[in-house]
Image (cartoon, helix red, strand yellow):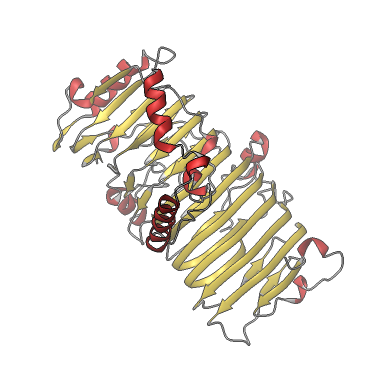
Amino acid sequence: MESDKSTFYSLFHIPCSRFSWPLLFLLFTLITFLSLHIPTISLFSTSIFFFQPDQPLTCSHFYRLVPRRKVVMSIEDFGGVGDGKTSNTVSFRRAMRYMHAFRDRGGSQLNIPNGTWLTGSFNLTSDFTLFLKHGAVILASQDPKEWPIIEPLASYGRGRERLGGRHISLIHGNGLRNVVITGENGTVDGRGRMWWELWWNRTLKHTRGHLLELMNSDNVLISNLTFQNSPFWTIHPVYCSNVVIKGMTILAPLNAPNTDGIDPDSSRNVCIEDNYIESGDDLVAIKSGWDHYGIKMARPSSNIIVRRVSGTTPTCSGVGIGSEMSGGIYNITIEDLHVWNSAAGIRIKSDKGRGGYIENVSISDIRMERVKIPIRFSKGSNDHPDNGWDPKAIPRFKNISISNVVSINSTKAPVLVGVEGSSFEGLCFKNITMLGVASSSKWHCEYVSGFATDVFPVACPELLNSGNSSWCSPS
């Protein structure tokens, strides 16, 4: 060992009494050569040894990492056949019954191999991972009987489209914890056209099912997959907490009705980032219950971050808040959004009878191209679950900030139509530019008030109140 130390020491030690100028010259030449050929790294800084690239902001810590699953099996172990024709509904349900035994016992993972796996609805379990391998496709059954009818959500009081119950989602779960749905960009295809035609033809008997719905669940990760052709809203976490939806591609025909991308509903600590969405409705819609049912349940959506989402929707908005917001919505951050060829960029929707509140909303760094109305506040479609709604239940709005917005080739200036009798406090618009809109275009404002600075076209008079506007001063 001592001899090894001596050898190592002799390689790098230069005695001061015998300093070598040739060696110094050689060292200097080497440093100069490297600095010319690697200009992006400073050779005279310790940063080359500790260099770490800038990391984008992330909210993925909402999901708490879990240990590796104890049991890993394939759908083929349960009789699954991936030929796209054989029904695997029994195999998926059998697999989930088996995996259920490993909750609290190390957890389980079900792998879906390359192939097309036709199935009806199935329920997930806790401490569980559904993993779709590269080339794997879960293909939804088109037999409505394989989408059973379940109870309506308590905060809605009925199905969203029809009275009574609603079809269960293709992939469903209730009261779960530590759930991961991920893979190698595998696909879940809801084959929604059958359901859309029932809607178009007005022959739909019960509200359509989602592609994925998780209820009353905690610590959920949904990532690295393609979800397409959902019958109704695509991903719907409701009454959930600590949910991360990241790296997803969500697709539906641009005329497919109500095929929202991601709809967090009466949920908290939800991270939605790095997703691409094309749909026939809102890319992301934040909700919290419908009229008196939502008011009674009083289950708000809170601490929701939407970041680095891009996509298009010709009929709706990039991010919508409401109109089902009766349980309250607060502490919302929306940033780095890119929307094109869409009806609206940001839209806040409410109505008489909704009650509830929308508070502490920060929207910033938004890019839009060919968006008809970049910023829109509007009433809903005057839809109510039944005759029990209260016309005196008026929503409240407080501390909503929209900043750093650029829209190219927009059709209209912002349209801000509030609800008569509602209160606005702390409404702020700053550094907003609508390019391509005629300079004569005006913001359209009704039942709103607040402040705007550095906006083009010039804001409406309701937003030019300079009193106590320091909170909305230019940054």
Q: Position of residue 385 (x, y in %)?
A: 56, 45
Q: Position of residue 96 (x, y in %)?
A: 32, 21
Q: Which residue reaches farthest right?
A: 467
User: Foreground: 12 or 345?
Assistant: 12
Residue 85 appears left or right of 122: left
User: Foreground: 4 or 89?
Assistant: 4
Q: In which quarter of the image is the N terminus?
A: top left
Q: Which residue reaches farthest front?
A: 17
Q: Is residue 279 visible?
A: no
Q: Position of residue 374 (x, y in %)?
A: 55, 69
Residue drawn at (74%, 50%), measured in percent from left and top? Answer: 392
Residue drawn at (62%, 87%), measured in percent from left and top? Answer: 439
Q: Quadrant of residue 349?
A: bottom right
User: Foreground: 68 or 133?
Assistant: 68
Residue 338 appears left or right of 405: left
Q: Quadrant of the C terminus?
A: bottom right
Q: Can residue 439 be seen in this view?
A: yes
Residue 391 appears left or right of 122: right
Total labels drawn: 0
Above or below — where is 168 with respect to 309? above
Q: Where is residue 322 in the image (x, y as percent from the top left)?
A: 59, 52
Above or below — where is 261 with respect to 153? below
Residue drawn at (50%, 43%), measured in percent from left and top? Answer: 50
User: Foreground: 216 or 333?
Assistant: 333
Above or below — where is 84 with respect to 192? above
